[in-house]
Image (cartoon, rainbow, N blue to C red):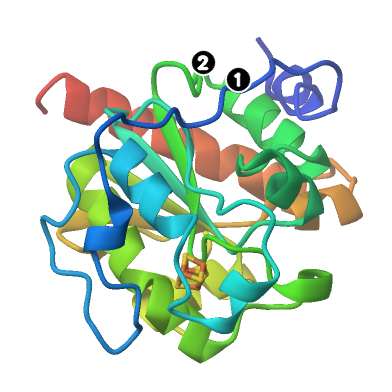
Amino acid sequence: MASDDQISLFDLSGTATPTPVASTPNYNPDLIPTDAKVPIVPGTYNSMEEMSQHCNRCQRCKLGQSRTHAVISRGNPQAPIMIVGEGPGQNEDETGLPFVGKAGQLLDKILESVRLTTERDVFICNVVKCRPPGNRTPEADEIAACRGYLIEQVRLVDPQIILLTGATAVRGVTGDKQGITKIRGQWTEWQGKLCMPIFHPAYLLRNPSKEKGSPKWLMWQDIQAVRARLDELLSGE
Ligand code: SF4
């Protein structure tokens, strides 16, 4: 398929309905402290379901006071690719699932354009698990309080590739304060994993041009590079 046609797949039309993380019987999240001063020890959780139950009672930062649902993940918890976004928006807070609004629909289309699916290849989560009021950017203390959960997700999923969507996710995860336009598409390393910053799909919604050099065109280059690297890793090269 020609690349122009592939970029057209980034247009929104129709979406699958994702499934929320299920709960685990007999797990008591009250046994784990939620005070931000108590670190989340690596190996605390045996599953995403356990972590989900804990996060839904968590008050490690002030975002816990206003959330409807903690937003943990969607996609395959054994996926080779993990995508990390900034934080939940209104749709995500209501459903308990990340990237389910227009930006999430576009993200799914971008993945589809290189034959990646959340059912098989991709696990999606956020830097902070609870919605910042008014969709503001998460603050440094909130990102720090929630960081242990993200590290646990990386340990549990053990992906081969991590994609960081947008500058806030990059800053929150790696500490890199450079603009996303400058660092997108460049491979780096975090938590021993191959890692690439990419544009946030919401940014692409605001910049619909598909001309060469446009954000959508650049995303197309990046997602092809990710697909190629994944193919190399899976074939053992
Ligand atoms: S954002 Fe993270 S640290 Fe803050 S209350 Fe929610 S789960 Fe806890």
Would you say the residues marked 1 and 2 are in contact, meaning their CB atoms lie under 8 Å apart?
yes
How packed is label 2: few (under 14 Cα within 10 Å), some, or many (20 or more)?
Answer: few
Q: Position of residue 2 (x, y in %)?
A: 69, 16
Picture quarter containing residue 27? top left
Depth order, front residue of 212/86: 86
Helix, strand or loop for disc 2 = loop
Q: Is residue 207 above or below residue 143?
A: above
In percent of the image, x 81 and y 24: which residue is there? 8
Q: Position of residue 210 (x, y in %)?
A: 84, 40
Picture quarter containing residue 85? bottom right
Q: Is residue 213 visible?
A: no
Quadrant showing the C terminus? top left
The residue to which callout 2 is attached is 115
Disc 2 marks a residue whose amino acid type is Arg
Q: Is residue 41 visible?
A: yes
In percent of the image, x 48 and y 47: which residue is there? 72
